[in-house]
Image: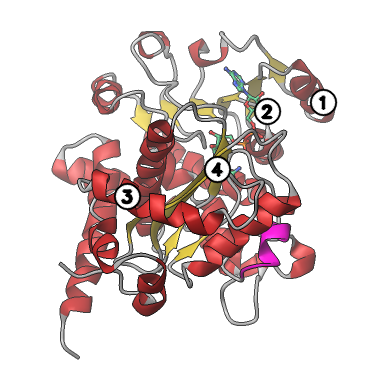
Amino acid sequence: MPCFEVNPVLFINTLTLRDVLFCHQPERFACFIHAWKNERGIVREHPSAKRLLGSRCHDTTLGPAAGGMRMWPYETEADALRDAVRLARGMTYKNAAAELPYGGGKCVVIGDPKQDKTEGVLRALGRFINRLGGLYLTGVDVGTTVQDMEVMRMESPYVVTIPEAMGGPGDSAPATAFGVFQGIRACLREVYGSPLPQGRTVAVQGAGAVGKELVRYLVETGATVTIADIDQEKTSVLAAHYAVNVVEPEEIHRLDVDVYSPCAMGAVLNDQTLPELRCKIVCGSANNQLAEERHGDLLAQRAILYAPDYIVSAGGVISGVDSLNPGGFNRQRAMEKVSHIYKTMANVMAISKEQNIPTYRAASVLAEQRIAMIRQVKSLAV
Ligand code: NAI
């Protein structure tokens, strides 16, 4: 069984060889826990960093693992590891489908982002990332900010989503929103024959960092937009800037609209919400929108076009890793690459039709085909 291909020597220095061999096999979970128990010893260089857990690489066929760092008050280590595995796998698929030269990984930290993010903890995390020697590249996720990355960057160049003033991409939400907008355009073209949002109706769930940028793109291109958020201040601020309708959070998915765009939390496509949908398209940034895979099948049966979340929400990671190019971050180049999400979504729909499978499965096919091709290329003696 081959081990990681990137900086293996450095990596073997931090873990035992056995751990490295087992590390990227999801089924060897027990060995993996063992590996990260060792790794926690390294993270505990700072006394306040007692509850840091470690990162998880899922697949590095395409290159070093890239994926954000999440801080969340998980109740148990098992919960945190389960989340790390799930999220790292998601990043493998997201990066593969986005044609990035990166594998998938995620770092989870057990902690309360409001209380536990001291400079010491963040720098300890930076040192931990650095010990992986480039095998894993990190950025912002739930519970972490660009400012946190700035602190971690003091310890490691493998922290990539740093502020623009430091040569990085800054906040990822605008790029994510631009990617979702491209996904919506691709879906509109499929369903209505034209990608133009003008005259179309869109319901955006969540007026947060991504939602508010997406609303801007939609309103500026002539769509009629309705928004909802559990935080009334956010909807008020957005409604003061743009001509949008506001509804209660429990109403938004039920609206009779062309596009329902979930940009808040996951599992919004479930047994309760699915019969209530009246849209033709679901396309938004929220991670893990399908409560279970079978909900993707049910959407297809109801002829609702579902844009797989990891396909259309890849803008943030695409822009994040742009800063690794020679010469550093270039916004124009990054956004140009994000705009390819239109084409990627078109490819997903083409596979779905050719193979007569729902779009969520077509997205997996697209990602797996690319990983298989690169694995084959790397196995060739050249
Ligand atoms: P955010 O935290 O800035 O915004 C989320 C918004 O959803 C908040 O305003 C919150 O009050 C609202 N919300 C929560 N529950 C709600 C509900 N039941 N109904 C209506 N609104 C509700 O988060 P952000 O950055 O905008 O991300 C949105 C989603 O997109 C998340 O699922 C995130 O994981 C995902 N995502 C974000 C990326 C980024 O670059 N920020 C990249 C890829 C995915």
Q: Is residue 150 magenta?
A: yes
Q: Which residue is mark 3?
A: 34
Callout 4: 10 Å neighbours few (<14), some, many (20+)?
many
Asked if the residue at label 2 sits under 8 Å from ligand 1, the reply is yes
- Whether residue 186 is visible to the viewer of this picture, yes or no, is no
**Looking at the image, residue 197 lies above or below residue 236:** below
The residue carrying mark 2 is 207
Q: Which residues are magenta?
A: 149-156
Question: 204 or 280: which is nearer to us?
Answer: 204
Distance between the Cα atoms at labels 3 and 4?
Answer: 21 Å
Query: Which quarter of the figure is the N terminus placed in?
Result: bottom left
Question: Residue 311: which disc?
Answer: none
Q: In the image, 172: left or right of 18? A: right
The amino acid beneath tag 4 is Arg
**Which numbered disc covers residue 70?**
4
At label 1, counting other C-alpha atoms closer than 10 Å, the crowd grade (few under 14, some 14-19, many 20 or more) is: few
The answer for how far apart the CA atoms under marks 4 and 1 are is 27 Å
Q: CA distance from mark 2 to mark 3?
A: 41 Å
Nearest the camera: 100 or 104?
104
- Residue at left 55%, top 43%? 70
Residue position marked by numbered label 1 in the rendering: 237
Q: Main secondary structure of the magenta part?
A: helix
Are discs 1 and 3 less than 8 Å apart at CB? Answer: no
